Amino acid sequence: MVTTLSTAAHQLHDSYPRKHNHYSFRDFFQFNPGEGSVTDWNGSRNLFTSEDFIIGLLEGLEEEVGKASAAIMYSIGLEWGRQDSLFFQGWFEQEFNMSVRQANLMFLLETWWWPFTSQGWGRWEVDMSDRKQGFMFINVFDSAMARTLGDVGKPVCHIYAGLFAGFFTEMVRKQLSCIEIQCYSMGETYCKFLLGGKERIDAAAFWMNEGATARDIQKRLRSEEGVS
Amino acid sequence: MIAIPSRNGYCPDAPPWRTATVQTFFAQMPWEGAPQRKPLGLHDAGSLAPTPILQQTVAAFFQCCPWEGRPEIAVPVMPRSVQPPPAKTAEALTLDDFSSLF
């Protein structure tokens, strides 16, 4: 599912602006047959796409630019995350009558991700246990990219990594990077992302190129923190 | 044959205070006119023999209780360990707390 800003108002939202449990398919999406468009609860225009579209996008890009396709998908996600963080702050404050700075963090993050879940991007889990060391993990279950491509033996969710980097960079107001260190497309059961400062993410990328697994990287990051 | 008396100065029923030391004996006298409190299970003032708790009178038993809350021996006061303030859990974080971690 792809989203852009829409001019069509969401009628149910307008009738019940304080309704929070609006993530079911019927409530979240509004189909506008006259316009041939779909609007979601927050006023974004949504496009339903098939798995063939995702495969075409990724394989077409790879054919055009080779290995740089991963960086391009990451960049797309990065810009998407930045834009979406601004969009999110707007609707969050409107819906909850509260600044994002005042809200409970876990509530805030869950609220941000729920529309993505409704749109088919998968469920997520934020692992904050290493937050004091300046990094955190995000697990994504049922990634749209990985589910579509299947087991190809390498990470494929670069757009997610970019999305997280862009969103958190804007929210935290510090330059953050993200890397997928475990992917459903590598034969794992879910995708795992590492979010942190650029140097740490570059180090993780190096370790991955050297053949380190997600567990190796986690272990190494934690042991390095213990030594320092 | 001379018959030796079986007791020969030995008296099995002699009260224990006769064999008590001077210090023990005088320590158990009610010098101030008030009955002394005895710790549970210690010798009875009259006989110096241990009195099992279950055989004590109600009055004797309750005299042994530190009703005023003062123990017989001062209990050393444990110094309070200074605990650092608990760190915020992930559930209690705000975005600003989170930002400061990076």
Image (cartoon, coloured by chain):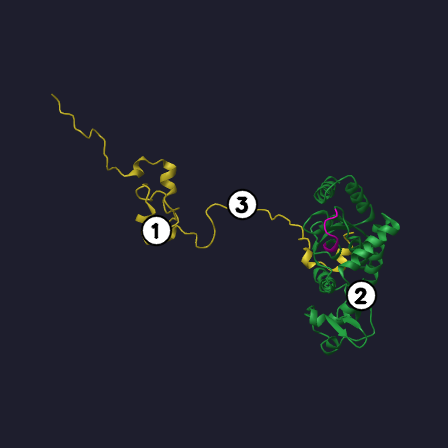
B88 and A18: which one is in front? A18
Colour chain A is painted in: green
- Chain letter, disc 1 residue: B
At label 2, which amino acid type do we have?
Answer: Thr
Asked whether the residues under marks 2 and 1 belong to the same chain, the reply is no
**Mark 2 highlights which residue?**
A3
Report if residue A29 is visible in the image.
yes
- Frontmost of labels 1 and 3 is 3
Circle number at residue B60: 1
Q: Residue at x 47, y 49 (%)?
A: B71
Separation of marks 2 and 1 at Cα, in angstroms: 88 Å
Work out which quarter of the rendered image holds the N terminus of chain A and state it: bottom right
Q: Residue at x 68, y 53 (%)?
A: B87
A165 and B29: which one is in front? A165
Q: Is residue A63 magenta?
A: no
First in sequence: mark 1 or mark 3?
1
- Frontmost of labels 2 and 1 is 2
Q: Residue A78, image x and y in percent?
A: 83, 56
